[in-house]
Amino acid sequence: MKQLLLLAFLLLIQSVPAATVKDREGAVRGDKARLENDPRWNWNDVDGGFRLAKTTGKPLLVVLRCLPCMSCAGIDASVLEEQELVPLLDQFVCVRIINANALDLSRFQFDYDLSFSAILFNGDGTIYGRYGSWLHQKDPLNKTTAGFKKALEAALAIHQGYPANKAALSGKQGGPTPYQTPIEFPALAGKYQSKLDWNGKVVASCVHCHMVGDAFRAYYRGQNKPVPVEWIYPQPSIETLGITLATDEVAKVEAVADGSAANAAGIQAGDIFTRLNGQPLVSIADVSWVLHRSPDSGSLPATVLRGGKETTVTLDLPAGWRLKSDIGKRVGTWPMRAMAFGGMKMDDIPDEERTALGLDKTQMALRIFHVGEFGQHAAAKKAGFKKDDIIIQISDQKQRLTESALIGDLLLHHLPGEKIPAVVLRGQERVELNLPQQ
């Protein structure tokens, strides 16, 4: 019974935009009361952390934690309480950040859809690496810190070789951004201040990390421009290239998919990536960062450890490789559903059900299982779309696509204000509608 209840709970939190703790205000205020004067954790003071790192010569560990969000609660508790981590943490200046309001976006570029992330720096601001786990994001009860420990150890090794290795770290540094801090973006400006409102509703004054990614996308959309592909599919998993990495290692290959780009490159299970595009790695999040900054097609050099020896391999990035990303469970996808779908959520119909419905396995067949009712998320409902409709054509697009791929296709090729002809099956009836772009 306990296993069934746990399974039901995990399915529930993956089906909603972001499950939150019951007492959100209490969670934030409790964290402050507990850690504001903690001897190890420099609480919510990045600048103070950098000053201390420069003074002590230690590397800087910045943990970013969205407290109201239930995801990653397990690893967050372990990082704060696990005694086995203490010897490692004591080699760092440790900073805990609980809101994104005043983040310097030139320094803090990471996977904004995660509710627990970490960036490891030199005191001069040079980034050694990033950590963030979708394993924990999907399971708030998971407390394992094996991968986090490996990331800390790898960052310490990079720190030992610094500054001689600084050139190899250049690709890890953030690129230019339209604004220096999140609250300068038009979507957030005037609504949030640089500091939290501790005298009022503190949670309502907090910019959550996922709101940064949302603000980037709204910035481009607001200028009537296509959303850049790297912001539709941010920090992509290397699974898009056919590689499954072990979650408790830095970057160890667990499996390679037949017929994939990785298979063609000769990558094997058991290989350990030591460098990707010339960058030393500290975690799977570092791998995603390299892919985030990679071209839409081309070659990606890698160094792997195989049988105790390093060897160089080259991954070919096929055109459109990012569109294979599954972004369905990202919280940042919900605003994109409003932009591209008018607030609908849909799933590709599996092969066995297609046969029963008389649908071809190569054609578009996306069943709508959620139609929003408020604000921009109500646009599809107003246009006539209904729950359980099956979308079989969008404009001249008829071939089979996942929801994630269709979001990308629409945001890359259509702009706000357009109404795209669509055909849906409603029972035995074909209905023609217009899909609003926002």
Image: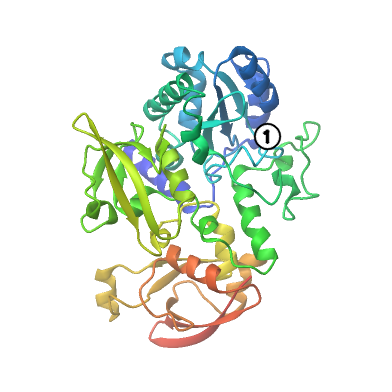
Above-or-below relation of 199 to 219? above
Which quarter of the picture shows residue 280?
top left
Number of labels in the image equals 1
Which quarter of the picture shows residue 341?
bottom right
Please tell me whether mark 1 sits on a helix, a strand or a loop: helix
Judge by depth and name the residue closer to the eye, 82 or 201: 82
Horizontal and vertical percent position of residue 246: 30, 37
Q: Quadrant of the C terminus?
A: bottom right
Going by the image, does 74 lie left or right of 263? Answer: right
Going by the image, does 145 lie left or right of 122? Answer: left
Residue at x 58%, y 63% (from the top left corner): 227
Judge by depth and name the residue closer to the eye, 374 or 93: 93
Above-or-below relation of 355 to 99? below
Going by the image, does 365 lie left or right of 339? Answer: left
Above-or-below relation of 432 to 249? below
Residue at x 30%, y 76% (from the top left corner): 362
Horizontal and vertical percent position of residue 358: 28, 81
Whether residue 130 can be seen here: no
Whether residue 113 can be seen here: yes
Q: Amino acid at mark 1?
A: Glu
Residue at x 25%, y 51% (from the top left corner): 265
10 Å neighbourhood of mark 1: few (<14), some, or many (≥20)? Answer: some
Horizontal and vertical percent position of residue 134: 43, 42
Which residue does the numbered mark 1 point to in the structure image?
25
Q: Quadrant of the N terminus?
A: top left
Horizontal and vertical percent position of residue 306: 21, 35
Judge by depth and name the residue closer to the eye, 39 or 294: 294
Judge by depth and name the residue closer to the eye, 132 or 20: 132
Looking at this rendering, what residue extends furthest in the left direction? Answer: 307
Which quarter of the picture shows residue 123?
top right
